[in-house]
Image (tube, rainbow, N blue to C red):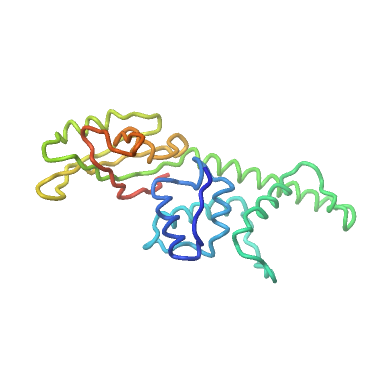
Amino acid sequence: MTVSFSDLSSAKGLKELDEYLLTRSYISGYQASRDDLAVYGAMASSPAAKEYPHAARWYNHIKALLGESFPGAGNGVGLAGSSSAAPAAPAKKEAMEVDSSDSDSDSDDLFGEMTEEELAAQAQKRKNIEDAKKRAAEKAKKSKSLIIMDIKPWDDETDLVEMEKYIRGITYDGLLWGACKAVPFAFGLKKLQMTCVIEDTKIESMDEIIEKDILKLDEDDEVQSDFVQSVDVLSFNKVG
């Protein structure tokens, strides 16, 4: 499903992106993709971490991945008449594909035959890019996220011990339930504050688990769980 955001230079666009990334590590799927590159390219700078913590977390992560792909320090370059930042993403991808191709481009011959040193430098550059891609893929496999949730019961008659058992009974490869405690919140009621750790490559979206398994939403998005009335994600942070 195509995802769209408002102008990412505006507060509205950044808020939409921050809310979208609340329970996600990437724009699409469980590893960095062209969608992440396109959104990153549409942003002039990192979002303010205080106002948009999830968008800032994502931005810094993608920036780090790009840094691994392009390890050279560079001297800076001025580009006159450049268009808006958003269309830059495909250009970055095209450049990478050209660099990583096995055949020589016709443009290599525009200035005559390449020297041995130039050929060696080109081969090394290709190797660096491939090594960076492999490191990024390995890093994505090991990536984990720590989630803290507020889980509210229907009323004061709900047995919180049984509610915790019900939640811990939800099992997936890549999902590990952690600490849990009862916290007062209104009119003498208590809720569960519960943590879990997910492996990002195995659990694509915590939203699905919350909606399908904890709340048991029906076709009309009505909660069918006997224990849980609502779930609020308090924090979602990468831990590896």
Q: Foreground residue, 43 or 225?
A: 225
Number of labels in the image equals 0
In the image, farthest residue toward the right: 112
| Residue beneath the point at 55% across and 44% down | 136
- In the image, residue 79 sits, relative to residue 70, either above or below, namely below
Q: Quadrant of the C terminus?
A: top left
- For this orientation, the residue located farthest to the front is 220
The residue lying at 59 percent from left, 48 percent from top is 34
Closer to us: 80 or 228: 228
Q: Is residue 15 above or below residue 226?
A: below
**Residue 223 x/y as whole percent:** 28, 37
Q: Position of residue 85 (x, y in %)?
A: 60, 62
Residue drawn at x 40%, y 59% as measured from the top left:
52
Left or right for 113, reference 214? right
* Residue 66 on image: x %, y %: 58, 53
Answer with left or right where residue 227 lies relative to residue 236: left
Residue at the (32%, 36%) spot, across then down: 217
Q: Quadrant of residue 55?
A: bottom left
In the depicted structure, whether residue 3 falls above or below residue 227: below
Of 72 and 192, nearer the camera is: 192
